Image: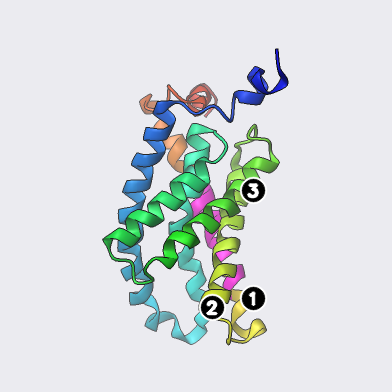
Amino acid sequence: MPANDSPTATAFTRWRTLDIVTCAVLAVAFGVVFWAWNFVWTGLEPALAFLLPLKGILYGVWLIPAVLAPLIVRKAGAGVFTEALAAVVSALMGSFWGVLVIYQGLVQGLGGELVFAAGRYRRFGTGIAAAAGATACCAATVWDLFAYYQNLDFWAFQLPYVAFAMVSGAVIAGLGSKALVAAMLPTGVLDSFPAGRERTRI
């Protein structure tokens, strides 16, 4: 049997129709959430004006699909596909940042994907989820620095902005996604996915 046809080689690369549909549904749902969260982001900016980098703490909501999709379907590329498609939905609904959010969605998805790839798509514990959320937020905010905040001071804004966002990514996108999966397990909706096998362990 060729190496790339072995069960271990294809377990995380062979997508089923169910996997694609599930990621697409998550993307559409969170695309709407992204669009709504744009208003929360801009609405809270004045309240956080006393410490501008603190707005990074709101970032994690935008990174949930990059972590949640891989935790559920456990296929290579799930985070990139779902996060990018959610960004497309958000852009089509009228994102404040226009088409740039699509490119950023790809960057965000790749940021989270790196952590799951480093674990060879075999590790999906709490630490991995938190790390994926943090790295997704890191990628997203570094993009922001080049796209929107190049002229702001590194120590006063850029570094703390990325740091606050990474905390948000770890807690909201990482731990939040893990909590969502744990909440769904008893319902049986994940029984068709590898994540469903954890039902008896949580």
Which residue is at 44% across, 80% downward?
A: 48
SS at mark 1 in the image: helix
Three-letter amino acid code at the position of disc 1: Leu
Per the picture, the main secondary structure of the magenta-coloured stretch is helix
Residue 26: image tag: none
N-term-proximal mark, 1 vs 3: 3
Seen in the picture, residue 151 relative to 7 is either above or below; the reply is below
Is residue 60 visible in this depiction of the protein? no
Left or right placement of residue 16 versus residue 34 in this view: right
Q: Which mark is residue 114?
A: 3
> Residue drawn 64% across and 48% down?
114
Residue ID for mark 1: 159
Residue 65 is situated, as x and y percent measured from the top left of the image, at 45, 48
**Mark 2: which secondary structure?**
helix
Residues at marks 2 and 1 touching, judged by CB atoms closer than 8 Å? yes
| The N terminus: image quadrant | top right
With 179 as the anchor, is 97 left or right in this view?
left
Q: Amino acid at mark 3?
A: Leu
Is residue 170 one of those drawn in magenta?
Answer: yes
- Nearest-to-viewer mark from 1 and 3: 3
Residue 180: quadrant of the picture: top left
Front-most of 88 and 189?
A: 88
Q: Residues within 10 Å of mark 3 (few under 14, many from 20)?
A: many
Residue at mark 2: 53
Read off the magenta span: 161-175
